[in-house]
Image: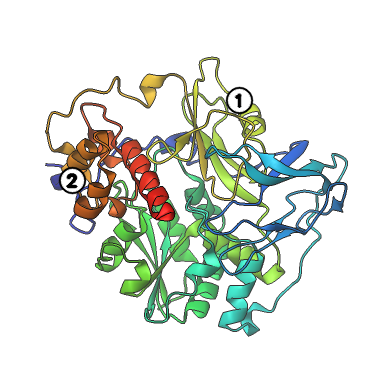
Amino acid sequence: MLNALFSSRSFKHGVHPPDFKALTSGLPIRRLPFADKLIVPLSQHTGKPSIPLVKPGQEVVRGEPIAEADGFFSVPQHAPATGRIENIRLMPSARGPKIESIILQVYGGSTQQEMYEYRHDVDAMNTDEIIQAVQNSGMVGLGGAAFPTHVKMKPPPEHRVDTLVANGCECEPYLTCDHRIMLEQPDRLIKGIRLFMRALGVERAVIGVEDNKMDAVRVIQKHLEPNDTISVMDVPTKYPQGAEKMLIQSVLGRRVPPGQLPSSVGVGVFNVGTLAQSGELLPLGRGVIERVVTVSGPGVERPGNYLVPVGTPVRFLLEHAGTTADAKEVILGGPMMGMTVSALDVPVTKAMSGMVVFEHDQENHQGPELPCIRCGYCLSACPMQLNPSMLGMLATSSDYETMASDYHLNDCFECGSCTYVCPSNIPLVQYFRIAKSVNRDMAAKA
């Protein structure tokens, strides 16, 4: 029944929640003022944490490297503002555990002009030089995954990538930062795509955009040359269309096998925000020190897309955007895959694409958990065609090993579609996250 609602030029299953994007999609990106103090975690990415290059008391200028990469599977960090290093110590994070962080006292009287740069002739750079420049910039997946971008640009030697896919779907409700980037920075986006195409050695790129953002499709098309090797394709609006495996299937008709990466089917997928920032930063030799963040939801007085320095406390951002008297729940990311934050003093990181504020629990939760009624809605919704009902029952009995060995738990990318359609309000995706965590701990001990 769900499938009949969607076009055949897409993946099977999925859901179509209200998008609530009109709150911010028409508002231009605005720069957020600098907080008095910024907190820069040394682990804002998948992989090894960065190694500090600075000491307490040291003065730094905006854009200066303050932490270096610890090997290939790591990225450096840069000063988001001109100021003085106050301390380097463990600080709270949105994910729970405290993370070693650099605390920067911002100089209020500074113009905060970005003066630290090493310009490159990007047209003369070879593949390895482009990939190294991407790592030097500290770039990670700005769509939320925070996987080091330069690692994705160097697929395994047995995989030959022939197509770059730029992910402009932004299927999460409320979030519109990628939409605004495509509308306001198409030249940077195209420049970033061409650089990444050269590094990957591909002659074809496709920008996938959901068909509720046709204004972005038209803007991008105007910036493409006749017979360009870059094309833009609108795909049906459906969640989770922005998941890379789903998008590949929609725009190229290729299915990534379970447990495999996109490179196994000849594809490299990058978020449009990642590509646009790379198009801007690489020629200047600069690092990632800010990102666009959507602040939205019924609990926000001044919703919008804000250009936010990395390390800005969430509390400062919310104070600037304003919250209603009834604001109760803050979710970092979108409501489908994001996480509720319990402390507002955690910092904005490179991976934080949005913040949604609800006024009361009923806006994001449907009620108390009830027993499974075997309705099968979760099977019809799962884009990976798993059996969330059975996985949920195994989770309640703590049979995590069977979940992974017999029911493909690790193929779940935690999109939350099953939880969204469950009439019994069973928090299936939370069960799956716990199961994965337990299995990882058991594997590590073994």
Image quadrant holding the C terminus, namely bottom left
Q: Amino acid at mark 1?
A: Gly
Q: Horizontally, is 338 left or right of 2 in the view?
A: right
Q: Which residue is mark 1?
A: 322
Figure check: 425 above or below 89: above
Image quadrant holding the N terminus, namely top left
Element class at badge 2: loop
Name the image quarter holding residue 426. Answer: top left
Which residue is found at the position 53% from the left and 53% from the top? 181
| Residue with the most extreme top position | 325
Figure check: 146 above or below 231: above
Picture coordinates of residue 9, whole percent (x, y): 22, 59
Picture coordinates of residue 384, whole percent (x, y): 24, 53
Figure check: 380 above or below 193: above
Label ID, residue 387: 2
Answer few, some or many: residues within 10 Å of disc 2's Cα (few below 14, many 20 plus, some between 14 and 19). Answer: some
Q: Horizontally, is 162 left or right of 402 in the view?
A: right
Tell which circle, 2 or 1, labels the residue nearer the N-terminal end: 1
Which residue is found at the position 32% from the left and 66% from the top? 260
Picture coordinates of residue 309, whole percent (x, y): 68, 46
Answer few, some or many: residues within 10 Å of disc 1's Cα (few below 14, many 20 plus, some between 14 and 19). Answer: some
Q: How many marks?
A: 2
Figure check: 269 above or below 405: below
Which residue is found at the position 54% from the left and 37% from the top? 96
Q: Amino acid at mark 2?
A: Asn
Name the image quarter holding residue 380. Answer: top left
Q: CA distance from mark 2 to mark 1?
A: 41 Å
Picture coordinates of residue 62, whole percent (x, y): 78, 53
The mark lying in front, picked from 2 and 1, is 2
Q: Horizontally, is 178 left or right of 261 in the view?
A: right
| Residue with the most extreme front position | 446
Element class at badge 1: loop
